[in-house]
Image: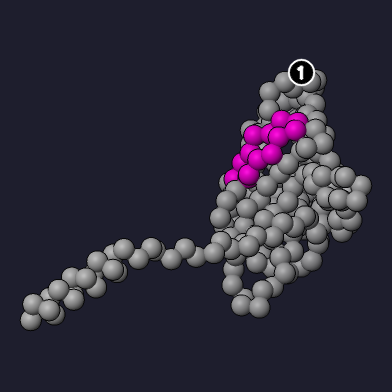
Amino acid sequence: MKLFLLASVLFLHLVAAMPTPVLPPHSCTTITPKSLTALDNSSPDLPFPQGLFAGSSSLMIMHNNINATNPTHSLQLIEFAIPQTTSGATGACQLQITDPACSLTFTDSNDYAIPSPVQLKAISLHAITTGNNISYNDIFSAEPSLVSSWDFGDAVMSAGDTASISNSEGCEGSVWYVLDYEDVADGGYSEWSMFQQDEDEASGMELNGVYLTYC
């Protein structure tokens, strides 16, 4: 009996001393947009696709509220295509924006050069099967709206910055976001733009603009 108790105690000590196994980290993949589209309320039922993203383009948000009775707004719609995994599992995604090229510009009719950072927000959309034919009204006037979250995340950006817009939301297939300002002034004109560029090691070009990582 004493030998049995001694053996049991030794076994428990050995189990307690064994290190907790560390699982290898999931590998993550970075992708750039599949397509870019301007959403313009001056033609609210028409999409203005910039076409399939082919390595370089530009991102833009514009609010013209000088004419308070007829303001014009142009927002940036972004599509990502996540390859289907063999397991069919939904990964965690992180929407990010980076500007190593220092290409970010923000102009304003009241104070042409804005010294303070610009706060952007991302609106996430439900899975869409209609192709790249989304219009302004599909998001802001349709019932039900295509919007999954009006406040998916935000980022404060200055030229040269890198920021995460949102973290750890499951995603698969086609993923869509709309970029807008977090706080829109009632009057005046403002425009934000940034260069969108794929990384090209051969030419030394760095990734610039929005991108998505999924694990």
Indicate the amino acid at tag 1: Asp
Q: Does the stretch in magenta take in 161?
A: yes
> Residue 28, image x and y in percent?
65, 60
Visual colour scheme: one colour
Q: Which residue is mark 1?
A: 111
In the figure, 17 relative to 94: above or below? Answer: below
Per the image, label 1 sits on a secondary structure element best described as loop
Residue lying at 72% horizontally and 69% vertically, measured from the top left? 83
In the figure, 52 relative to 7: above or below? Answer: above
In the figure, 134 relative to 57: above or below? Answer: below
Residue lying at 65% horizontally and 40% vertically, measured from the top left? 163
Q: Is residue 40 visible?
A: no
Q: Does the stretch in magenta take in 151?
A: no
The N terminus sits in image quarter: bottom left
The C terminus sits in image quarter: bottom right
Query: Mark 1, residues whose alpha carbon is within 10 Å: few (<14), some, or many (≥20)?
Result: few
Residue lying at 68% horizontally and 23% vertically, measured from the top left? 116
Q: What segment is highlighted magenta in the picture?
A: 153-165
> Residue 188, image x and y in percent?
76, 25
Q: Nearer the viewer, residue 215 or 52?
A: 215
Q: Is residue 69 left or right of residue 90?
A: right
The residue sitting at the right extreme is 203
Residue lying at 69% horizontally and 73% vertically, measured from the top left? 84
Residue 24 found in image quarter: bottom right
The residue sitting at the top extreme is 111
Q: Nearer the viewer, residue 107 or 87?
A: 87
Q: Nearer the viewer, residue 17 or 177?
A: 17
Residue 20 found in image quarter: bottom left
